[in-house]
Image (cartoon, rainbow, N blue to C red):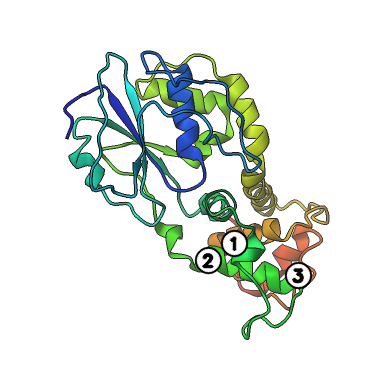
Amino acid sequence: MTNDPLITCVWYPSGGFGHFINAILTVYGQNFCRPNNTNYKLSDTGDSHSLDLVAPKWFHDPEQYAFDFTGPERYCVLIDNGINNEGERFQQYFNTASIIRVTYDEYTWPIIAQTLIVKAMRQSLDDQLPLGDADWPVDADWARREKYFLYLRDHPLRHAWRSKHYCQNIGLDYFEDYGLLRSWFFLNGYEVADFDDLYQTWWAANAKYFEPLDVARNIKLALFNGSNIDLTEYTDLWTQAVVNYSIWQLTEVEIPANDYANWFTNTKEIVTLLQQHGVKRFDID
């Protein structure tokens, strides 16, 4: 165990968000120990894993962890137990460290649901959610969209990685805006230099994971305002599934997969469907 107070643990689920926070702190954070090589490139999936770490990861609850925290700079330590393990045994070793915890909720879960497969498992959605078995004999868009939706609705990790009162919690919504993200660091006691260049590079590679929720947000806003918007440009099946999931969250109405095999062409069609299920009012959470 270490009594060194100059340690920040970054405790995170899958998706590369912990490594990104580590990059911000160790390259731009005041009084943080710097990596040996600060020149690195993001991977094709948007990971920043290639950056040298200033201290070894706490990886999958090791039996032993040894590193000489000599200081005087602050160290950043990644806590990587995997998304399925929220165990707190690492605190027995880093017993005086501050803890940054990356969190999500049911609203932002689709971001993690996708990055869990694409970034952490390095697989495609179709590899992990295949059709063609006894339950899914039809290789059609409606079937694939429905399988994506059920994955989002039914996966137990949808309820994981909530805030902890003893942590400095950062939700995924903070990653969508540079100013908001930088303000979070200052409000939590971390002085960081301007990292806009890093952020813009990271966002260019990672915006695709947030975009389906942006589409869902705009559609829900249209429902709330009673406006009719065209939806024919949204042909990506994962995006459509995220919208269906968001509508289900909002109204508890599941989109009938076969009845809407071609999905929606405009929001008026969604309103008609929801009214048929007794939904008269649309509130934005």
* Lower position in the chain sequence, tag 3 or tag 2: 3
Q: Are marks 1 and 2 in contact (CB under 8 Å)?
A: yes
Mark closest to the chain's N terminus, 1 or 3: 3
Placement of 260 over or under 209, stated as above or below: below
Count of marks placed on residues: 3
Q: Tell me if label 3 and label 2 are in contact, CB under 8 Å.
A: no
Query: Type of residue at label 2?
Result: Arg
From the viewer's perspective, is 233 left or right of 9? right
- Secondary structure at badge 2 equals helix
Asked if the residues shown at circle 1 and circle 3 are in contact, with their CB atoms under 8 angstroms apart, the answer is no
- Disc 2 crowd, CA 10 A, few/some/many (<14, 14-19, 20+): many
Mark 3–mark 2 distance (CA, rounded to whole Å): 18 Å
Marked residue nearer the N-terminal end (1 or 2): 2
Instruction: Name the one closer to the observer, 197 or 153.
Output: 197
Question: What residue lies at 50% left-to-right and 41% top-to-bottom?
Answer: 172
Of badges 1 and 3, nearer the viewer stands 3
Q: Label 1 belongs to which residue?
A: 245
| Quadrant assignment, res 159 | bottom left
Report the front residue among 1 and 251.
1
**Mark 2 highlights which residue?**
153
Q: Quadrant of residue 267?
A: bottom right
- Where residue 155 appears, as percent x and y from the top left, is 48, 65
Amino acid bearing label 1: Tyr
